[in-house]
Image (cartoon, rainbow, N blue to C red):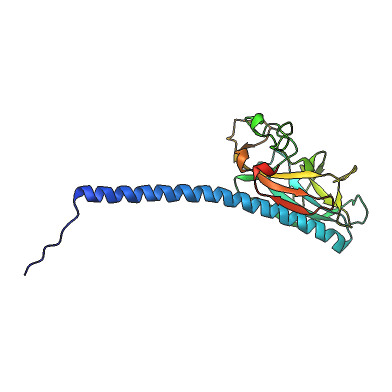
Amino acid sequence: MRTTAKAFTLLELLVVIGLIAGLASLLTTSFAGGGKAAALHSAQASVAHLLTAARTKAPAVNRKVRLLVHADPNQPERYLRLLVLQVGRQSGASPADWDSVQSVTLPPGTCVVPASLAGLVSDAAAWKRVTDPDDDLVSDLFTNQALSHALEGDVAAQAWTGVAFTPNGTLAALGAGPPPKGYVVIARAQIRPPGTYTAGEPPLLLVNPESARGLVLSAYGVPALLAERNAF
């Protein structure tokens, strides 16, 4: 007895190929979105870890400790993505020398939002806080916190922002003045193409304020994570 194998028709093959292509497109889109969300979550966790490390290390070594965030637009590869944990070599409120003990670069496509949105957004009205629409969605913890510093191996000093902790583990200004307070905002960002901005302007453009996340520090410097835009 002879058995005859039934072959697929051309129409059936086209339907199967179409289904495979559609599934592949769906999976690619899902993974891409998930990758962006994962990168933002990783950036948030890194900032929270470094702030916690700074707060706990200060009383452990009985020195002032600070967390610096790179804020020099002339260094695009570092700008708002390089974070450095430093310990003062001398005791007191204003150590003359600092040792870098840890540095972290946030995932590509993410950054720490500074205290000002100048040059960083195309639509400033979209970057407002939900809890207070008159305020920009920025890291006000870094307001008036700026200094010039050269890391070991750097040819020249660069601009930084950030926050410091006293030997008691409480918040302190990077320099003089009262302790800072407020939020740290972390957002997605895209690199601006060369030629679309001039020297001194931000090399990044913040995107999608709805995906912003971050943290807020208590008066004692304890960070609490903020997982959505509505928390700001």
Residue at 92% across / 56% down in the picture?
91
The vertical placement of 126 against 213, above or below, is: above
Mark count: 0
Q: Residue 203 occupies which quadrant of the picture?
A: top right
Residue at 88% across / 44% down in the picture?
175
Q: Is there any visible trace of residue 100 in the rendered image?
A: no
- Give how far across and how far down residue 201 sits, in percent: 68, 32
Q: Nearer the viewer, residue 154 or 33?
A: 33
Q: Is residue 196 left or right of residue 46?
A: left
Q: Which quarter of the figure is the C terminus placed in?
A: top right
Q: Residue 98 occupies which quadrant of the picture?
A: bottom right
Q: Which quarter of the figure is the N terminus placed in?
A: bottom left
Residue at 49% across / 51% down in the picture?
31
Q: Residue 115 occupies which quadrant of the picture?
A: top right
Q: Nearer the viewer, residue 88 or 17?
A: 17
- Give how far across and how far down residue 94 sits, in percent: 91, 49
- Give how far across and how far down residue 55 sits, in percent: 81, 57
Q: Is there any visible trace of residue 118 in the rendered image?
A: yes
Q: Is residue 99 left or right of residue 118?
A: right
